[in-house]
Image (cartoon, rainbow, N blue to C red):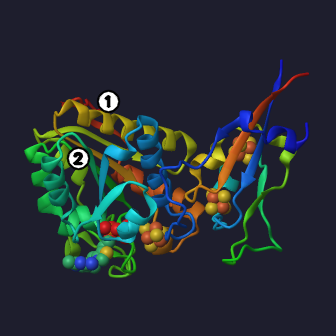
Amino acid sequence: MGKMKGAVVVDVERCKGCELCIVTCPQQVLANKEAQVNSKGYHYVYMERPEDCTGCTNCAVVCPDGVLTIYRVKEEV
Amino acid sequence: MDIQEIIQPENLVYERTQCLTDATLSYCPGCGHGVIHRLTMEVIEEMGIQQDTLGVASVGCSVLAYDFMNIDMTQAPHGRATAVATGIKRCWPNKFVFTYQGDGDLAAIGTAETIHTCNRGENLLIIFVNNGIYGMTGGQMAPTTLPGMKSSTSPYGRDVELMGNPINITDMVSRLPGTYFATRQSVHKPGNVRKTKKALRMAFENQKLNKGTSIVEIVSNCNSGWKMTPAESNKWMEEHMFPFYPLGDMKVNGEMVEKK
Ligand SMILES: Cc1ncc(C[n+]2csc(CCOP(=O)(O)OP(=O)(O)O)c2C)c(N)n1
Ligand code: SF4
Ligand code: SF4
Ligand code: SF4
């Protein structure tokens, strides 16, 4: 059986650092960039643990600002 | 597998809808308005009705909705959105028409318009965002504010002896003969977001039937007005708003839904 692998692309300038995607992700993939901000001063989100992403889209679905684009592929083993 | 191998056009499963403009939403970080805008536009995109939909923004934080929704829109004076939408729909009965209103707009100054639009059974959709407060003007008490809930004009909590009871207006209008579909949803969790989208889709589809008014209430957060983080506000909403404003359908296809 193949395992689902996902990837999240963050539109950094759109992100407001609200953290709703972070608390929603069932795999704890996402985190705020603590040391970096976008041009509006928000600590934007990034994939801290990309290897655990399944591409389930939950984070993108709850994001109020349409920041996240999701890709998903079945990894053949 | 390398991330760059996954990020390929053929693997795309979710992207921001083209029916939203490129403008940055004016809402506070974490505010439910953004999700509700996106869902409305996703449904319009999926139905292929971008050129045939006319929206009416109201007064409240969503006053600028016409800057964000890439369709023809206008903006009504406070509370009058459904009256303006009635005029639009009667002039263009074949277009899809919706209003986008907060609880201050729809259930305070716009109470008369809301009730009469539903009672007349105007063939349009009311998207009602209930955050229990006047968000835009600084978190004042609204007719929908819960008993005991703090707001800038009820700093010790709403005292129903003095300030009256909150109003469950969707439940009220669901009982009017002109109302064809009435439901209450939320957008704080992925499952709820998906249900809200289904409800919006059904409401837009209903307009083809010409059977009456659809109202989709979304209980939403106002994390700034409630003075909480977005995640805290969603939790507070589950614990306090949902018992008073239970989620679910009230009327479907013109029939009241029996409560179990
Ligand atoms: C005729 C009139 N009266 C009062 C106001 C002030 N006002 C602006 S927004 C608003 C309430 C908005 O609250 P709500 O509809 O709940 O929307 P939210 O901002 O919470 O999304 C009020 C009273 C106004 N703009 N026009
Ligand atoms: S939910 Fe959206 S805006 Fe909020 S932190 Fe995540 S990506 Fe940024
Ligand atoms: S797609 Fe799913 S697993 Fe991947 S970051 Fe988003 S919520 Fe987490
Ligand atoms: S004030 Fe409240 S309703 Fe308005 S944008 Fe901010 S969080 Fe949203």
- Mark 1 neighbour class, 10 Å CA radius: few under 14, some 14 to 19, many 20 or more: few
Q: Quadrant of the C terminus of chain B?
A: top left
Question: Who is closer to the viewer here, B98 or B72?
Answer: B72
**Residue drawn at the location 83% of the way across and 42% of the way down:** A52
Question: Who is closer to the viewer here, B114 or B168?
Answer: B114
Give the residue furthest to the front. Answer: B51
**Residue drawn at the location 53% of the way across and 57% of the way down:** B234
**Residue drawn at the location 45% of the way across and 38% of the way down:** B195
Question: Who is closer to the viewer here, B118 or A15?
Answer: A15
Q: Which amino acid is tagged 2?
A: Asp
Q: Chain of mark 2?
A: B
Residue tagged by mark 2?
Answer: B171
Residue B256 appears in the picture as rendered? no
Question: Who is closer to the viewer here, B7 or B60?
Answer: B7
Q: Is residue B105 left or right of residue B119?
A: right
User: Gap in Å between the C-alphas at discs 1 and 2?
Assistant: 16 Å
Residue tagged by mark 1?
Answer: B260
Nearer the camera: disc 1 or disc 2: 2
Q: Position of residue B56 (x, y in %)?
A: 28, 59
| Rendered view: B210 above or below B95 | above
Q: Quadrant of the N terminus of chain B?
A: top right
| Rendered view: B107 above or below B216 | below
Q: Position of residue A28 (x, y in %)?
A: 77, 49
Q: Position of residue A53 (x, y in %)?
A: 79, 42
